[in-house]
Amino acid sequence: MHSIKKLLGKRIKELRVANRLSQQDLAEKIGIDQRNLSNIECGNSFPSKSLSRLAQALNIDLQELFDFDHYKIDEANMVEYIQRNLNSLSQTDLTTIYRLIKSMH
């Protein structure tokens, strides 16, 4: 089981990337050093003093920072998700996935 710091760091990074922000950009928006943000995203520190600013900078409610449910996916759900989404992929993406799977066997 991941610690809350690791899960929160992973979630912050996920939201930062979804918002197309670099670590430097987000760090500047919330008033911390980029190295501090890196430590938060790696799960090495907890952003207790900057939680509200993080949520605001990422355009989400504070509670959304702690939405970790999608990280708890089992094998059956992974397979079902992949199967459900294969038809919507481009030929390039399908080729990439094919090559990835083939390289694993």
Image: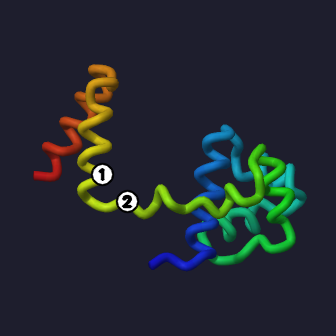
Q: Position of residue 55 (x, y in %)?
A: 78, 54
Q: Position of residue 82 (x, y in %)?
A: 28, 41
Instruction: Tell me if residue 20 comes above or below residue 35 in the rendering.
Output: above
Q: Amino acid at mark 1?
A: Met
What's the residue at 55%, 62% (across, down)?
68
Q: Secondary structure at mark 2?
A: loop
Q: Are marks 2 and 1 in contact (CB under 8 Å)?
A: yes
Q: Quadrant of residue 33?
A: bottom right
In this view, the residue in front, 103 or 70, is 70
What's the residue at 30%, 53% (across, down)?
77
In this view, the residue in front, 75 or 44, is 75
Describe residue 43's horizontal placement relative to residue 79 as left or right: right
Q: Quadrant of the N terminus?
A: bottom left
Q: Secondary structure at mark 1?
A: helix
Q: Which residue is mark 1?
A: 78
Describe residue 97's horizontal placement relative to residue 6 as left or right: left
Q: Position of residue 61 (x, y in %)?
A: 76, 52
Q: Amino acid at mark 2?
A: Ile
Q: Which residue is mark 2?
A: 73
Cα separation, mark 2 vs mark 1, equals 7 Å
